[in-house]
Amino acid sequence: MRRDMDLVRLILFKLEEHEHGLAPRPLGIDGYTEEQIGYHVHLMGQAGLLKVADTTVLRSKSPRAMPLHMLWAGHDFLDAAREPTRWTRAVERVKKAGGPMTLEILKEVLIAIAREGLGLR
């Protein structure tokens, strides 16, 4: 399964919009299967964006996790990725450069675009 940075962003939005600090259950994001969501939550736990509980079982086809709550780094990434125009520009910039779409590179590009918008170098 390929990593989908748009899904990562959507998962963060879903947790943030929930009125409490703990993640809503079920998470459910239109257009994505529970397997896709669970796998991406697992990856987001590895990346330090979310605190997660591993829900992988022997019959699972992919590693899976359930989000518990967003971590500081998750809030920081979401704040950098919040603005739709900035998100689109950052993704296009990384794709155009032919570089890898890693979390760190994408976050750096998002921050660079935000700095440009603020007139900062």
Image (cartoon, rainbow, N blue to C red):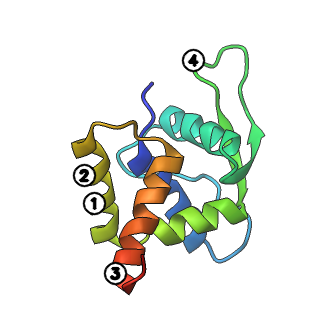
Q: How far apart in space, not on screen, are marks 3 and 2 (Cα)?
A: 17 Å
Sequence-wise, the earlier of marks 4 and 1 is 4
The residue shown at (71%, 26%) is: 56
**SS assignment at label 3:** helix
**Vertical position of residue 70 compared to residue 64: above or below:** below
Residues at badges 2 and 1 in contact (C-beta under 8 Å)? Answer: yes
Q: Residue 85 at what x, y percent from top left?
A: 27, 70
Residue at label 2? Answer: 92
Residue linked to disc 1: 88
Residue 14: x %, y % from top left: 53, 63
Quadrant position of the N terminus in the picture? top left
Q: Are marks 1 and 3 in contact (CB under 8 Å)?
A: no
Q: Nearer the viewer, mark 3 or mark 2?
A: 3
- Residue at 38% in and 51% down: 30
Q: Which residue is mark 4?
A: 61
The answer to whether residue 45 shows anywhere in this view is yes
